[in-house]
Image: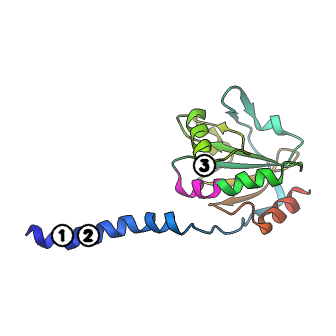
């Protein structure tokens, strides 16, 4: 009886392990961001979050277009797009668009800092909302979700799911919608 289970166990283990092995050696190519722009900007409910030492709100960024990415360290699609967000932050360093990645990890800034160090994410600021109020305020049902908020604090675009944020098409789309 036990010998007949061995082939089944090998097949099950292969199905479980294969996606992880393939992803390790053949990186997934994410699509360019398909940021949907609104014809009429949406009001955004303000909410509090932290940079690890002080409390902030979206009003802190008023006057500057911001790309808010809501994510978590335990979310595989989020992890896949973080390197491209890091490169986007570098591309936008001299532009008037701020990248605001807000982690919803309940363990807070220390977990995010460790995650950033492990992946070499040195162009992104650390923002956290362990209370997950960002999810309700921005009407987010899944992560990662990225929202473009205009200078006036209203939502002007959104995409759900991971994207290659530093792809030329993504950069062009963000700057067009943000009016840069």
Considering the numbered disc 3 on the image, is that residue within a helix, a strand or a loop?
helix
In the image, taking residue 162 as reference, residue 99 lies left or right, namely right
Residue 113 at x, y = what percent? Answer: 61, 37
Quadrant for the N terminus, please: bottom left
Magenta span: 75-82
What separation in Å lies between label 2 and label 1 (alpha carbons)? 6 Å
What separation in Å lies between label 1 and label 3 (alpha carbons)? 38 Å
Considering the numbered disc 2 on the image, is that residue within a helix, a strand or a loop?
helix
* Residue that mark 3 sits on: 119
Question: How many residues crowd around disc 1 within 10 Å: few (fewer than 14), some, or many (20 or more)?
Answer: few
* Residue that mark 1 sits on: 6
Residue 29 at x, y = what percent? Answer: 62, 69
- Which residue does the image show at 67% across and 62% down from the upper left? 163
In the image, taking residue 49 as reference, residue 131 lies left or right, namely left
* Residue that mark 2 sits on: 10
What separation in Å lies between label 3 and label 2 (alpha carbons)? 32 Å
Residue 164 at x, y = what percent? Answer: 69, 63
Which residue is at the far left?
1
């Amino acid at each position: 009886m036990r010998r007949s289970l061995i082939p089944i166990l090998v097949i099950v283990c292969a199905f479980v392990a294969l996606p992880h092995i393939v992803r390790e050696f053949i990186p997934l190519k994410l699509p360019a961001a398909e940021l949907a722009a609104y014809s009429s900007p949406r009001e955004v409910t303000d909410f509090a979050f932290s940079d690890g030492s002080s409390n902030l709100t979206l009003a802190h960024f008023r006057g500057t277009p911001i790309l808010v990415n809501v994510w978590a360290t335990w979310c595989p699609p989020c992890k896949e797009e973080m390197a491209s967000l890091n490169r986007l932050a570098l591309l936008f360093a001299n532009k008037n668009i701020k990248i605001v990645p807000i982690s919803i990890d309940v363990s807070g800034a220390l977990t995010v800092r460790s995650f950033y160090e492990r992946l070499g994410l040195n162009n992104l600021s650390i923002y956290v909302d362990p209370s997950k109020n960002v999810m309700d305020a921005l009407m987010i049902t899944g992560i990662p979700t990225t929202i473009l908020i205009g200078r006036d604090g209203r939502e002007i675009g959104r995409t759900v799911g991971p994207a290659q944020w530093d792809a030329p098409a993504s950069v062009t789309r963000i700057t067009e919608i943000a009016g840069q």
